[in-house]
């Protein structure tokens, strides 16, 4: 199989709560050298609570532990971060360390812009992380990042409209019709109709993105079944679909939608709008139209990577920060203040019902492919969904068009 993407088993996430409860808040690596000295430059694209926590809590905690190692930080707008990093590292510059998402790994590794970590991070250290989050960061059998947290889309529900989370799409249909019947401007589900948010249903219907040669295979009966299902929601009472995250979240925050599909990053906004007592999280309803198949949303891993040019003492110093940044001390802070779901099993979130719900959802999740070809998927598949929802194309034609566009774009990558 060419490239680095393979479907990584994620069932090990089921052991998260047990592992966290038994290990508790572990101490930092006992081999850490308190006499470390030097200077590192870290780039990130975080904003809001994540950026505030990094600046006000994480870095001061590191500085207190390692007073002779200065961490310089540059915040770069996320939509500019990858290009800026790639350009500067290619010319011998850039930061020592980069925080980024899972789907950058393949492109940056192929471009020799990030450093493999296998000679710097031993297996005993990696054993402290959820196996799926570590394996997701391997490309061509080499480790290219340290996992900080994981995320997946699940179902948020308003407990005043949905006292108990619905378990299946058939149950959701019934509740949505009931809610809409009582109030025509209220909905059972407000669905952000891009590709990322309903992807759990694409995979749950059996859709696939790539074959063993990393060519697109989205044109399939399973994709057509997914497209017909999502299009059919428009004719059912109590569903609101729009390719606009703000519009969808606004309906939920205003109490006009009983449920939305979103990730852990949305929790703060929803709690602020509705009150913590009214916000619940549960796995997305299983697919009644496909024999009760589970949803399989993308599993994302936030992680930290190392500049490919680092070696010797500087690489060793950067590796120490990576281990600490993804370890229990800093992870605990990010859990508390930024709502992260920790990849390190030494952080105890067993008492958090919402975290547990995301863990349950993640048990069936699909690791986001790290191959460079994944970058060619988003726009054509997003357009595929939109064209079917607007009636501009049949499901069959839309799937065929998307596959052709993706494979043409993949072909052009080597031009």
Image: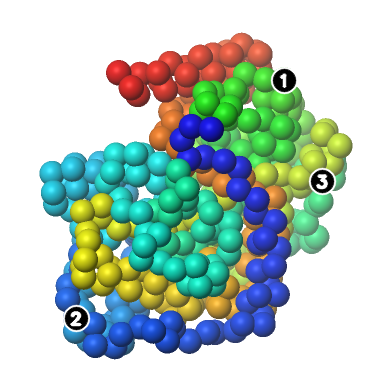
Whole-angstrom CA distance, mark 1 to mark 2, is 58 Å
Q: Which residue is mark 2?
A: 37
Q: Earlier in the sequence, mark 2 or mark 3?
A: 2
Label at residue 168: 3
The crowding category of the residue bearing disc 3, from other C-alpha atoms within 10 Å (few below 14, some 14 to 19, many at least 20), is some
Look at 25% across and 55% down and name the residue there.
Answer: 307
Distance from Cα at disc 2 to Cα at disc 3: 55 Å
Return the x and y of residue 132 as percentages of the image width and height.
58, 56
Going 61% across and 11% down the picture, which residue do you hit? Answer: 397
Report the residue marked by disc 1.
221
Instruction: Name the spot of residue 252 as percent of width and height, x first.
Output: 61, 51
Check contact, mark 3 vs mark 1: CB within 8 A. Answer: no
* 155 vs 106, nearest the viewer: 106
Left or right: 142 with respect to 173? Answer: left
Horizontally, residue 159 falls left or right of residue 117, namely right
Query: Regarding mark 1 in the picture, which secondary structure is present there?
Result: helix
Residue in view at x 58 percent, y 64 percent: 130
- Lower sequence index among marks 1 and 2: 2
Residue positioned 67% across, 30% down in the render = 207
Residue most extreme to the front: 119
Q: Is residue 199 above or below residue 11?
A: above
Which quadrant of the figure contains the C terminus? top left
């Amino acid at each position: 199989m060419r490239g680095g993407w393979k479907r990584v088993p994620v069932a090990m996430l089921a052991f998260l709560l047990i592992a966290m409860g038994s290990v508790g808040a572990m101490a930092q690596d006992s081999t850490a050298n308190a006499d470390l000295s030097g200077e590192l430059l870290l780039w990130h694209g975080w904003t809001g609570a994540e950026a505030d926590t990094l600046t006000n809590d994480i870095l001061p905690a590191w500085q207190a532990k390692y007073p002779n190692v200065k961490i310089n930080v540059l915040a770069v707008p996320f939509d500019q971060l990858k290009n800026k990093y790639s350009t500067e590292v290619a010319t011998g510059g850039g930061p020592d360390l980069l925080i980024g998402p899972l789907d950058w790994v393949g492109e940056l590794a192929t471009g020799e812009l990030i450093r493999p970590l296998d000679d710097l991070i031993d297996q005993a250290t990696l054993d402290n992380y959820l196996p799926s989050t570590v394996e997701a960061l391997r490309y061509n059998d080499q480790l290219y990042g340290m996992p900080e947290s994981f995320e997946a889309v699940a179902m948020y529900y308003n407990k005043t409209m949905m006292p108990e989370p619905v378990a299946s799409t058939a149950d959701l249909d019934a509740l949505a019709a009931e809610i809409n019947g009582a109030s025509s401007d209220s909905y059972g589900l407000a669905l952000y109709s891009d590709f990322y948010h309903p992807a759990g249903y694409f995979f749950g219907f059996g859709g696939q993105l790539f074959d063993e040669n990393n060519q697109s295979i989205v044109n399939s009966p399973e994709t057509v079944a997914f497209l017909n299902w999502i299009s059919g929601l428009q004719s059912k009472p109590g569903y609101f679909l729009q390719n606009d995250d703000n519009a969808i979240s606004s309906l939920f925050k205003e109490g006009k939608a009983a449920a939305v599909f979103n990730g852990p990053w949305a929790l703060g906004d929803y709690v602020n709008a509705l009150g913590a007592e009214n916000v619940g999280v549960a796995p997305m309803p299983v697919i009644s139209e496909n024999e009760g198949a589970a949803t399989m949303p993308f599993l994302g891993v936030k992680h930290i990577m190392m500049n490919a040019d680092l070696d010797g003492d500087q690489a060793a110093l950067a590796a120490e920060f990576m281990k600490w940044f993804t370890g229990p001390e800093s992870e605990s802070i990010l859990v508390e203040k930024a709502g992260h779901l920790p990849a390190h099993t030494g952080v105890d979130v067993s008492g958090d019902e919402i975290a547990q719900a995301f863990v349950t959802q993640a048990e069936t999740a699909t690791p986001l492919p790290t191959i460079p070809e994944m970058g060619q998927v988003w726009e054509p598949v997003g357009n595929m969904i939109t064209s079917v929802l607007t009636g501009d194309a049949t499901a069959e034609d839309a799937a065929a068009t998307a596959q052709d566009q993706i494979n043409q774009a993949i072909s052009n990558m080597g031009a």
